[in-house]
Image (cartoon, helix red, strand yellow):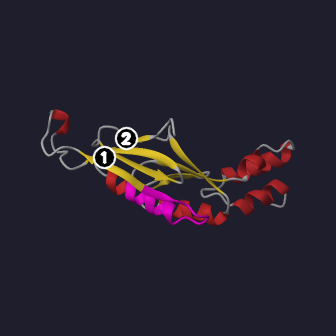
Amino acid sequence: MQKITPFLWFDNKAEEAMNFYVSVFSGAPGGGTGKVLSIKRYPDKALDEHMVGMQGKVLTGVFELNGQRFMALDGGPIFKFTEAVSMHVECATQEEVDHYWDKLGEGGDEQAKQCGWLKDRYGLSWQIVPAALPKLLSDPDHEKSERAIKALLKMKKLDIAELQRAHRGEI
């Protein structure tokens, strides 16, 4: 049983966001998975002032991406996502990096794309990270790791081959 579940507040687009994330992860190279598990909706009548206009919207939605459960709700525009919290997607191949970067970044904030980070169309921040990156950045040979870090800092989408070439001192 998963003990901690991220709970995401959307500006009345929770169902759209869940379906979008499920489509991105279900179609991923390497056998990604995604599914909506349940949706509970606000009641047909407002029970208090916080529920006015929310009839039929998502009160709680549960979805799963690559085995990780998330919850979502339609809460309106009161609270926004910030970069202080992000979703980290570890990718085994450049094909996976490209897939998640392209799909999650589509319609998002172009200015937020830097060093493997992006912001999607709902304002949620994601880190699209090659699995090889920690080893490159923590090499005991500090010159190698510094070269990899310098290369990373110049990138938007991370390029595994370019990071490896920088690590080896080939660029």
- In the displayed image of the protein, which residue is found farthest to the top? 48
Residue drawn 31% across the image and 50% down it: 39
Q: Position of residue 169 (x, y in %)?
A: 85, 56
Residue drawn 47% across the image and 39% down it: 5
Q: Is residue 93 left or right of residue 74?
A: right
Q: Mark 2 points at which residue?
A: 80
How far apart marks 2 and 1 lie (CA) works out to: 8 Å
Residue drawn 34% across the image and 38% down it: 79
Q: Give the class, few, some or many, for how many residues have Cα within 10 Å of label 2's Cα (few <14, many ≥20).
A: few
**Is residue 121 something one can see in this rendering?**
no
Say what amino acid the circle numbered 2 marks.
Answer: Lys
Q: Magenta segment range?
A: 18-35
102 or 35, nearer to the observer = 35
Quadrant of the rendered image containing residue 142: top right
126 or 26, nearer to the observer = 26
Sequence-first tag of 2 and 1: 1
- In the displayed image of the protein, which residue is found farthest to the front? 1
Q: Is residue 28 left or right of residue 78?
A: right
Indicate whether residue 25 is drawn in magenta.
yes
Asked if marks 2 and 1 touch (Cβ < 8 Å), the reply is yes
Location of the C terminus by quadrant is: bottom right
36 or 25, nearer to the observer = 36
For numbered disc 2, what is the local secondary structure?
A: loop
Q: Give the class, few, some or many, for how many residues have Cα within 10 Å of label 1's Cα (few <14, many ≥20).
A: some
Q: Mark 1 points at which residue?
A: 11
Q: Is residue 78 left or right of residue 104?
A: left
Say what amino acid the circle numbered 1 marks.
Answer: Asp
Vertical order, 6 against 114 (above or below): above
- In the displayed image of the protein, which residue is found farthest to the right? 141
